[in-house]
Every structure is written in C-alpha cells, then in structure tokens.
Amino acid sequence: MKVEKMLFTDRLYESAKEIWEKSYNHPFVQGVGKGTLDQEIFEYYMKQDYVYLIDYVKLFAIGAQKAPTLEIMTKFSHLLHEHLHFEMELHRQFAAEFGISNEELENTEPAPVNLAYTRYMLHVAHNGTLAELVASLLPCAWHYAETGERLKEQYGATLESNPYRKWVETYSSEEFTSLGKWLIDLMNQLADGKPERELAELEKHFLITSKYEYLFWDMNYHQQNWTL
Ligand SMILES: Cc1ncc(CN)c(N)n1
C-alpha cells in the first residue's frame, strides 16, 4: 500500500483553517463578494492596503537576497515585479475611479494593525531564515487567492453588476493564484527534512500572520486608526 506523505502546507492549512473560515465569513469579505460593501470602507481599505503592499514587496527583495539558488532568486524578483505592476495597479485603478491620487495612496499613514502586521513580517524576514520568511508571508498570498476563488464560485453569477468585480477577478485570476502556488511549493521544499522544533516555529509564523489577515479585514471594516 502506498502511503501519501502529508505536505507541510497541508499541516499549515489545517491549523489555520478556522481563522481563514472566520475571515471568509467576515462582513468585509462577504460585502465584496455580494457587492454591497460601503464604498467608503472599500476606499479606506484600498489606501491601507496600498501601503501594506509597499512593505510586503520588500519581503520579496529580502527573499531574493536569501535565496539559495538563482532559480529561486529569479522567482522572487518576478514576485516583486508582479506585485508592483499587477496587484498594485488594481489599487491605482480603483483609486482613480474614486478620485484618489497616487500620491494620496502612497502617503497613507498605516493604521496600528497594518503597521504591526508588516513590522512582524519584516522582522522575521530580516532576522529569520528563508523558510521563516516564506511561512510568514504565505497567508497573504494563499488566503487572498483562496478568497478570490471562493467568492468567484459563490457570487460569480452576480459579478457583472458588482462594483468590486475587478477585485474578485484579480485575486481569482491565474496570474495571481499561480504566485501563491509557487510559494506553497517553495514552503514544502524548504520545510523538507527540518526537525519538528523548526517546523513548529514556521507554523507559529503562519498562524500569527493568518490572524493578522483576519484583523486586517476587521480593521478596514471598522475604519480603525490611531485614536491619539
Ligand atoms: C492585507 C493583505 N493581505 C494579502 C494581500 C494579497 N497580496 C493583500 N493585498 N493585502
């Protein structure tokens, strides 16, 4: 009998499943899928997410620097390019539609959860191994691809009239989901043969940033910001 080896990312998915489910059912995410989310909330999110992404792409630069092979380095530089020119273009297009300039987008002050989330990943990226860096940035890519695909499946029939259609289409697109798939494969490659102590550390990073993903939806939904 052939016994299939469980992938490390299966373990990660299993441990974060409940948090991801909670995120998917968050009124922000459901509001995007149904097209009913208040535009003011979406505008707030676009601005916060833009500066989040400016920090997020730095992780790929650090990934390239820590890459053990030229092939992995090339892929990180591709990820960096795609986020700057494909994903962030979505934000620039929505912003233009809402009358928000690129300058305003770029100069958004990150709210506390946003800042804490990106500082956490940057800290891991600067001080940890490449495996730790990938474990901490993976929920961002994987959770969004899963969210985009699920929303498209659930609300595909009404997407035509949904003001957030482009958001759902971007995150469910092959162009975006393939980036997440490559990171999943890399995670498994880097985790292979690692002792349990190190795997547990990777799982901890993955769970923390999965929780930050949930908090990020919630922060935007309530337009939380500095109160001082
Ligand atoms: C907070 C957050 N997480 C994930 C993604 C998808 N790159 C994003 N744009 N923003």
Image (cartoon, helix red, strand yellow):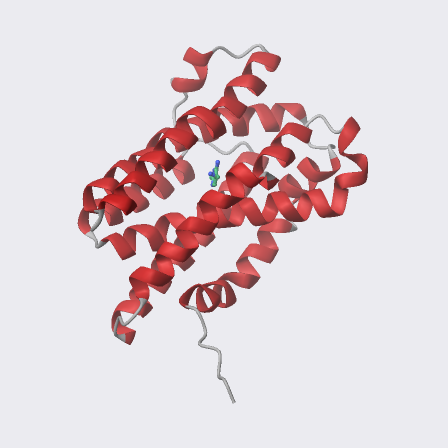
Q: Please tell me which residue is depicted at 48% across the width and 30% down the height of the picture.
A: 87
Q: Please tell me which residue is depicted at 43% across the width and 69% down the height of the picture.
A: 7
Instruction: Using residue 104 as the reference point, say whether residue 59 is left or right of it.
Output: left
Instruction: Using residue 139 as the reference point, say whether residue 38 is left or right of it.
Output: right
| Rendered position, 131 above or below 199 | above
Provide residue 39's location: percent of width, then percent of height.
66, 24
Q: Please tell me which residue is depicted at 59% across the width and 38% down the height of the picture.
A: 173
Provide residue 215's location: percent of width, then percent of height.
49, 46
Instruction: Using residue 151 as the reference point, say whether residue 227 is left or right of it.
Output: left
Q: Please tell me which residue is depicted at 21% across the width and 53% down the height of the picture.
A: 128
Which quadrant of the view contains residue 132? bottom left
Provide residue 35's location: percent of width, then percent of height.
73, 32
In terms of depth relative to the viewer, which is nearer, 158 or 218?
A: 158
Provide residue 65's location: percent of width, then percent of height.
19, 41
Which quadrant of the view contains residue 193? bottom left
Can the viewer see residue 23 in this picture? yes
Instruction: Using residue 157 as the reference point, say whether residue 113 is left or right of it.
Output: left
| Rendered position, 142 above or below 190 | above
